[in-house]
Amino acid sequence: MRLEGRRVVLGVTGSIAAYKACDVLRGLQKEGAQVRVVMTAAAQELVRPTVFRSLSGSPVLTGMFDDPQGEDIKHIALTEWAELILVAPATANLIGKVASGIADDLLSTVISAAGCPTLFAPGMNFRMWENPVVQGNVRKLKGLGYRFCGPVEGRLASGAVGVGRMADADEIVRAAVQALTGDDEGKGLRVLITAGPTREFIDPVRFISNPSSGRMGYAMAEAAAKTGAEVCLVSGPTELTPPAGVEMVRVCTAEEMRAAVTERVPQADVFVGVAAVADFAPAETAGAKIARADGDLTLALRPTADIIAEVGRAKGDRIVVGFAAEAGEGVERARRKLEAKSLDLVVLNDVTEPGSGFEVETNRVTLIRRDGSAEPLPLMLKTDLARHIWQEVLKLVGVTRSGGVA
Ligand SMILES: Cc1cc2nc3c(=O)[nH]c(=O)nc-3n(C[C@H](O)[C@H](O)[C@H](O)COP(=O)(O)O)c2cc1C
């Protein structure tokens, strides 16, 4: 019961995901929150207010000019009552109105008059979400301190798959807890993370790659986002669902990953290179599928760019963390890597150990720090390990921000 007695206004807008707000309401109540529901006119077209009234045990607030009934809370007093305004789902329309200072119905008026944090859980068609105007509104609101949870990638109401689906209720409740309990040590940090493998094409249908699942990088992104950091995840091809609240950039080759990182790293306070970037790529990619022939085929390979080294070379005040997958004893190699690439922390991963490395849920790593210390950690779930490493990164950020030596 992390929200015992905490007061939340749940705004429900006219997204097809409006019915899922019932689960959000239930989740908030399970955490002990008192919840008052405000619905827009469009939301009432999709779900009847009676549903929320029954679940919340209080009248649902809908109209700006309705007279409060009996003991009911007066409309504008909601802004003083609320400790958090959570809009789930949030339409493109509502986000646009708040970004433009428009207050033409009860919910937008309450948001514009509120002194408490506001958290949006957008839900919309992926083309709406990708719309540069919507993206601009979201950036503007984030810049002003409004919080976002999701949207996530998944199957949308239209049947299409893309980013736009409202985050799961559990995730939204977790973000609400974070907003209310101040578990947000990462807030204000911009974090760039790479994950997954890359593919280096021999011809249009064949490539060189590795078995990296992306799990460790995705877990790092999730751990950072859960502390309120603004996270961008540059991912090679994986089967994973992007973590809620994380900006995804999908790439395929090492060169694409390098371009995506080079473009975004100047804005990042922290860079974490988890991706298993191919070290070599075919010197040339054939334009057409290479036909089977008798005899051997010899491929000439060229080294790919060392992305972490490039980031390290231009690091400035940025914290740079590298994951190193080594086969066998690699502490000395990792120490040399840390020095040579100006890293702040190396997470050394012996991929030959059972339960470690690619394609498994667990990992056993050794943390190599700038002071030369090497701390072996026990075998952990990648999600737990990610939280542990992120706490280590936050300590490093604390050291550099307070002017110490990282
Ligand atoms: C069936 C239906 C589903 C809709 N789903 C969404 C949606 O998921 N996300 C969204 O931003 N707009 C959606 N819309 C459009 C909004 O309802 C519309 O922009 C409306 O003006 C939003 O009003 P509100 O923000 O005040 O709730 C949908 C409309 C209909 C008819």
Image (cartoon, grey):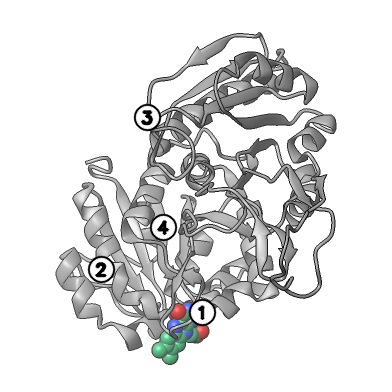
Which residue carries the number 3 mark? 380
Q: Is residue 333 left or right of residue 373?
A: right
Q: How far apart are the alpha carbons under marks 2 and 3?
A: 35 Å
Q: Is residue 343 left or right of residue 117?
A: right
- Taking the spot 71% from the left edge, 21% from the top edge, the residue there is 338
The image position of residue 34, as x and y in percent, is 24, 53
Look at label 2 and name its amino acid. Answer: Cys
Neighbour tally class for label 3: few under 14, some 14-19, many 20 plus, Cα within 10 Å:
some
| Pair 1/4: label in front | 1
Which residue carries the number 1 mark? 125
Q: How far apart are the alpha carbons under marks 1 and 4?
A: 23 Å
Residue 22 shows which numbered tag? 2
Look at label 3 and name its amino acid. Answer: Met
In this view, the residue in front, 21 or 111, is 21
Q: Are marks 2 and 3 in contact (CB under 8 Å)?
A: no
Give residue 236's quadrant in the image: bottom right
Look at label 1 and name its amino acid. Answer: Asn
The image position of residue 71, as x and y in percent, is 19, 64
* Label 2 or label 1, whichever comes before in sequence order: 2
Q: Are marks 2 and 4 in contact (CB under 8 Å)?
A: no
Q: Secondary structure at mark 2?
A: helix
| Label 1 CB less than 8 angstroms from ligand 1 | yes
Q: How far apart are the alpha carbons under marks 2 and 1?
A: 20 Å
- Taking the spot 42% from the left edge, 67% from the top edge, the residue there is 166
In this view, the residue in front, 399 or 272, is 272
Q: Secondary structure at mark 4?
A: strand
